Amino acid sequence: GFEAGNDITTGVKNTLIGGLAGDGMTTGGNNTAVGYESLSSVCTGSYNTAVGRIAMRAMTSGTENTGLGNAALLANTTGNYNTSVGSDSLKANISGHNNTALGFEALQAATVSNNTALGYQAGLLIGTGIQNVFVGSNAGDATDDGTNNVGVGHGALSANCGASNTGIGHQALSVCLASNNTAVGQNAQVLVTDGAQNTSLGAYALQTTTTG
């Protein structure tokens, strides 16, 4: 492609396909870039795979990252060991490590480490929260600074939840803002906002509880 790998000096074993793909790469090795402006910054990192328009465009020294999809891992510069599959997934990550995002806009705003999100807009707004696991469309999509949360199911833990919550099931703990709650079942604790240290098991369990 046009000017693909144009600035490579000592970099070896790179595969660059597409206009301006890897055009700023210098010493990085064993990288794969497929798509317009993928891996196009001054990159010294190695073992990165970027497939898609402007995927990993800002990468500088990060290593062993995988970004598949339009703008996947777009802003990543020094982050390592991230996996991003889906358009705009992990788009804002700059230096966070060990994140896994699978799905359109999954972990789109995340800038930290050790988060896992699978599903459409799962973990969409995570900014500073760490060590969260969200599986399902819109699971944890409004969580910003929550930590150590697990949400599995469509809309589970969908609000800006606190810490150490576990919601498993369709919309389990979907509006929870507090911490240390466990809800298993469809719509379990679906209305809990400020309640803490509650445990429920079964569909619609504690569904009318809001606080306490």
Image (tube, helix red, strand yellow):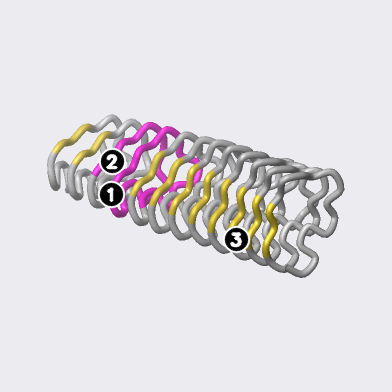
| Tag 3 and tag 2, C-beta contact below 8 Å | no
Q: Which residue is disc 2 drawn over?
A: 167
Q: Residues within 10 Å of mark 2 (few under 14, many from 20)?
A: many
- Locate residue 161, reporting x and y percent: 40, 43
Q: Point out the tag, 1 or 3, that comes first from the N-terminus.
A: 3
Mark 2–mark 1 contact, CB under 8 Å? yes
Query: At x 45% / y 39%, what residue is drawn?
Result: 146
Image quarter of the N terminus:
bottom right
Reading the image, the residue beneath label 3 is: 71
| Residue name at image x 49 percent, y 58 percent | 86
Q: Position of residue 155 (x, y in %)?
A: 31, 53
Disc 1 residue crowd, few under 14, some 14–19, many 20+, Cα 10 Å: many
In front of the other: 70 or 110: 70
Foreground disc of the pair 1, 3: 3
The magenta span reads: 139-168
Q: Which residue is mark 1?
A: 153
The C terminus: image quadrant: top left
Q: Amino acid at mark 2?
A: Gly
Q: Main secondary structure of the magenta part?
A: loop
Q: Amino acid at mark 1?
A: Gly
Alpha carbon separation for disc pair 3 and 2: 30 Å
